[in-house]
Image (cartoon, helix red, strand yellow):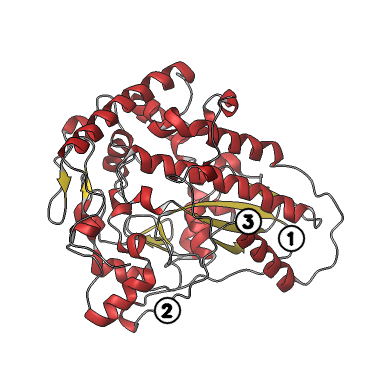
Amino acid sequence: MVTSAVWPYRRGRVRRTLHVVGHHLTLALAWTVAHIARPNEAPSAAALPSVLRFVPHRPTRLVRRLRSPARSWTEPVPAPPAELRTVAGIRRDPELERQAYEKAPLREFFGAHFEEIAPLAPVLTMIAPVLAVAPRLTAATTQLLRRQDLEPTTVPQTVDPQGLTAELKTYAAEIGISAAGITAFDEKFTFAEFVGNAVGEHVVVCVLEQNYDATQRIPAVRSEQAALSTYGELEVRMVLLADWLRARGWRARPETFEGESMFIAYAVAAGLGQLGLNGQLLTPHAGSRVRLNVLTTNAPLLHDEPKDFGIEGVCDRCKICVRQCPVGAITTVRKEHRGITKAKINTKRCLPLMMQSAGCSVCMKVCPIQRYGLPAVLQHYESTGEILGKDTDDLEGYDWPLDGQHYGPGSSPRVPDSVVSPPGFRFVPL
């Protein structure tokens, strides 16, 4: 993909005004509907009334502006140049991981912090589901929950693990999953509230690519709709994948899109990507423009290995998300946290902005791997020594929904204190 001097999705003055008005109207509607639907429960898109699945709606596959390309990634990813290589996957210290887990097992985020973030809790139903996506997402989640704990339909036969693994990945590609990897189940990656739910020692990690065009419009309601629609599309495919394993005699239990475990940790371990400075999984073909899900199984599958795609090296030379984050929540410094060396996001600054600006996600929008794919980024770097798209409006430009202004390289919106520190918001990291 070739960059242009000007971001092709840039809105004119009238459309930016409509962007702001529409954002504030839908935000107000989200608050209203959330209070009516579930005023006293922990925020959760899946907690919206299950009756929503009966609301007439078109399947996402028929909504071109939102649907996933649902294609298997087959394009080769070149090896990174030596100066971009770091480690396979991520730096881990197993002993420190163990100690952190024994001291304080992981907690499900929104449940653990509900009282602290209650003043903004209704917005966590997200604007998009309230308007259009909730029926699709709720229908997919309801179907998954109904089939989540089914038993195998036959007795397992003696199989070749290598052959079964290859067949599983072939089937995943046939049903439109972008990439699938397999790794070992690790209880340290499971939220304490869900320990004991796994049905085997293997984890199948699945990636589904998100609509490209909608993602480039971040921050916008349409972008959020695409993200949540993709979660629903992936849940449908996770049910199919679990049924495929059960039909061969093996147990399989998919998780809902909200997750009972750390999807990103499993994805890195399964060789599907590496962690970016923005705290997101960066896959080589689409960056963080993806949605993840996992299932546990007792099927005898072979494990994939973590890979060094050169993504940490790219991030260290890019840092666009660091300078473009509207509230400065992203750091360039990687530190050890629970045995993992990573750049940790300042959630206290990120969360309230995300909840009040159409999901924000500027850090996803301005990532060159998301925009162009890692092969193009590596090719450009080897030719020029520069990061593809850096310092161009094509990559770094976006229209901000809170003030209707366009921001590009070297500029970012001034976020009011009332947005960063809303009344009653008192987030404290666990």
In the drawing, does residue 194 fall left or right of residue 301?
left
Q: Using the image as rendered, state which of residue 11 and residue 196 is in the foreground.
A: 11
- Residue on which disc 3 sits: 175
- Residue on which disc 2 sits: 78
- Identified at 32% across, 47% down, the residue is 361
Q: Judging from the image, what secondary structure is the residue with disc 3 in?
A: loop
- Residue on which disc 1 sits: 299
- Identified at 15% across, 56% down, the residue is 409
Give percent across and percent down for residue 261: 54, 48
Which is in the foreground here, disc 3 or disc 2?
3
Q: Residue 242, can we see it?
A: yes
- Identified at 12% across, 55% down, the residue is 410
> Residue 21, labelled with which disc?
none
Q: Using the image as rendered, state which of residue 49 and residue 70 is in the foreground.
A: 70
Q: CA distance from mark 3 to mark 2?
A: 26 Å
In the drawing, does residue 130 fall left or right of residue 353?
right
Q: Residue 180: which quarter of the image?
A: bottom right
Q: Judging from the image, what secondary structure is the residue with disc 1 in?
A: loop
Whichever of callouts 2 and 1 sits on the residue coming sooner in the sequence is 2
Which is in the foreground here, disc 2 or disc 1?
2
Q: Residue 259, can we see it?
A: no
Image quadrant holding the N terminus, namely bottom left
Give percent across and percent down for residue 160: 78, 72
Give percent across and percent down for residue 236: 61, 45
Residue type indicated by callout 2: Pro
In the drawing, does residue 167 fall left or right of residue 383?
right
